[in-house]
Amino acid sequence: MAPSPTLIATRKSPLALKQTEMVRAWLAEKLPDACFEDLPLSTKVDERLSWSLEKRGGIGLFTKELEDALLENRATLAVHSAKDMPTSFQQDLVIAGYLPRARANDVLVHKTGNPLPQSIASSSPRRRAQVGLLQPQAEWTTIRGNVATRLRKIVEGEAEATLLAAAGLDRLGIEGHEGLEFMELPIEEVVPAPGQAAVAIQCRESELSKYEHLFCEQTKLAVSLERAFLRKLGGGCQTPVGAHYAGGSFYIFHPEIGHTSFEFEIETLSDIDGVLSAIFSDLKL
């Protein structure tokens, strides 16, 4: 008799389902005798496209229903975009690990031949603060919807440009769009959100030992550092802060200090507190 499948909670957006498919493929390779199936769930933020993410605070809006499924034993794992996760979770929940990180840059998508758009749609204070320095002529507006919907709305003229994560475009196989140009923004000029481009796998703490050794340690170290930096600031995804660690460089954007970076290597999670103490002392944040 075949074992019962292990259910993985996921949002229903095309990107969320694609990321969950990637997690299932990863787990199938690591645990070939196990069986995993999706548990697609609706979230309030997906159902209410009229909501302003900025006014709602953002923190946990994309994760609560998936976390509830874990706590109620309706699912064993949950898949999230790491940048959407709050810095603390509901009781007894932890991150089991991360898939290897993808391209972390933001991408400015604008109408063809219009690299200096007059209106850019984004609800992200982080993107507005940093891209506003590069595109001072632009006014800011918002559009909601999945990636394909946002691209269509730019073509239709709801705004002249928008900002999207390169990782999401890559995972959806979107390399271009008729009538639009895609401009990758350098990380040192537009520092990504903590956790951007990483897919996080969450579980109950009681089951952590089953899964924590299966995923990418390099991504775990980097994202743990970024999330710890944000936690130390007391911020969430609606705080205009960027933090990204890669290749021994830690890039930071904070509205009080602008852009800066530090060079160091971290080898274990236990290195993070000491590194951050030194950084906060230097920055006087």
Image: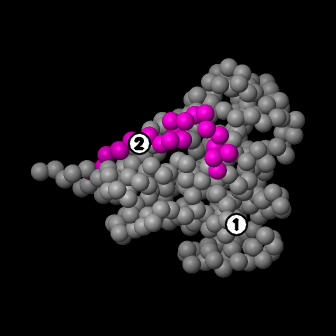
The segment highlighted magenta reads 35-57
- Residue at image location 29% in from the left, 52% down from the top: 6
Q: Amino acid at mark 1?
A: Leu
- Which amino acid, by three-letter code, is at mark 2? Leu
* Residue under numbered circle 2: 41
Quarter location, residue 153: top right
All told, the count of numbered labels is: 2
Q: Nearer the viewer, residue 278 or 88?
A: 88
Q: Which mark is residue 233?
A: 1
The reply to whether the magenta stretch includes residue 41 is: yes
Residue ranking furthest to the right = 137
Note whether 127 is above or below 90 in the view shown: above
**Crowding near the residue tagged with mark 2, few <14, some 14–19, many ≥20 C-alpha atoms within 10 Å:** some
Q: Residue at x 62, y 49 (%)?
A: 58
Q: Is residue 107 above or below residue 69?
A: above
Q: Disc 2 versus disc 1: distance between alpha carbons?
A: 31 Å
Residue 22: tell me if it is visible.
no
Image position of 125 (left or right of 72): right
Residue 48 screen position, x and y as percent: 55, 36
Q: Badge 1 local density, few (<14 within 10 Å), some, or many (20+)?
A: few
The residue that appears at 79% across and 48% down in the rendered structure is 129
Percent coordinates x, y for residue 7 in the rendering: 32, 50
Mark drawn on residue 7: none
Please identify the quadrant where the C terminus is shown.
Answer: bottom right
The residue sitting at 72% across, 21% down in the picture is: 157
Rendering coords of residue 107 (x, y %) = 69, 40
